[in-house]
Amino acid sequence: MSELTVENITDVVLQQMSTTPNARQKEVLGVFVKHLHAAAKEVRLTPSEWLMGIDFLTKVGQKCTDTRQEFILLSDTMGLSALVHLMHDKTAVEHATTTSLLGPFFRENTPRYKAGEQIAKSVKGKEVVLYGRVSDAHGKPLANAEVTVWQTAENGLYDIQYQDDPDVRGIFTTDANGDYLIRTTAPVGYSIPMDGPVGDLVTSQGRHGMRPAHIHFLISSPDYRELVTALYIDGDAHIADDVVFGVAGELVVKIVDHDPACPIQGASSVRYDFSLSKASEADKMSGRVGADPAAITKAAAAAE
């Protein structure tokens, strides 16, 4: 047995991990170990500092529930979710609509609506119509595509944060021409949850914790790559400094008050046409960074 030193410990660990039968697991964890060790050396990490890090990660895990996923929030605020999405976009076989973050507030328990129905149980502010077309990368309309939307209510919160019943979220289906039509309420910018370890970290960095007003979309059609994206409302004060780095210029839209092309006359509206790339072998695995918080905790419980 050789004596461990600062210089050889990384190689010793990697050698012991070399028996990992899963080639991808071996590759990913091997690179993680290399970079973790290199980072610890670069900053000259002390035992007390690493214990602080362990304490922080423990608190992040303890904050996770069926309605809150603090680890996804951590990934988002560190830009890791955005980076993974950007890399995933490069694997598409065709150019299609730019992706954005799924976020920590997606939920599988989402009601289905008919075209033109209102997804907000209470509309006290500005009603907005969302409409447009879903097509393939070459402009061919995609009939019967599923269009799932979710957003904050007028209180700046997602339903999952204040009630059990779904609100301001829904699943729609495109018609024979690939068109979708949704009635909702104008989204508002909001702060990420700041009452947990991720919020404490963001505050310690002197960051504001704000997200610009946006509406999430998850669009799918057989044989096509699932699209996870969002539309961001132009004019929001935090378009340029979103705390989770989710904004892309292509996804910034204006709410138009008098659009003659809007299917529901007299309503304020946003028109946006989405395009989907053909699916490849790589798309058989989910391209999402995130999931319904309840699904994550159930999967963890089942694995125990």
Image (cartoon, helix red, strand yellow):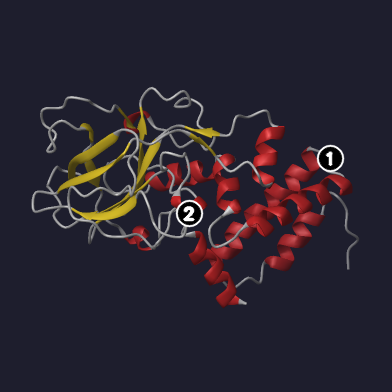
Q: Position of residue 173 (x, y in %)?
A: 20, 55
Q: Is residue 155 above or below residue 7?
A: above
Identify whether 252 is placed above or below 31: above
Three-letter amino acid code of the residue under disc 2:
Ile
Question: In the image, is 242 to the left or to the right of 20?
Answer: left
Horizontal arrangement in the rendering, residue 114 relative to residue 42 (left or right): left
Name the one closer to the observer, 24 or 276. Answer: 276
Q: Which residue is mark 1?
A: 44
Q: Dividing the picture into quarters, in which one does residue 89 lie?
A: top left
Q: Give the crowd class for mark 2: few <14, some 14-19, many >=20 residues within 10 Å.
A: some
SS category of the residue bearing label 2: helix
Residue visible at 41% across and 48% down in the picture: 88
Front-most of residues 202 and 259? 259
User: At numbered mark 1, what does the secondary structure look like: helix, strand or loop?
Assistant: loop
Q: Position of residue 148 (x, y in %)?
A: 30, 53
Q: Disc 2 designates what residue?
A: 160
Please tell me which residue lies in front, 168 or 135.
168
Disc 1 marks a residue whose amino acid type is Arg
Q: Earlier in the sequence, mark 2 or mark 1?
A: 1
Q: Identify the image quadrant of residue 87.
A: top left
Residue 125: image tag = none
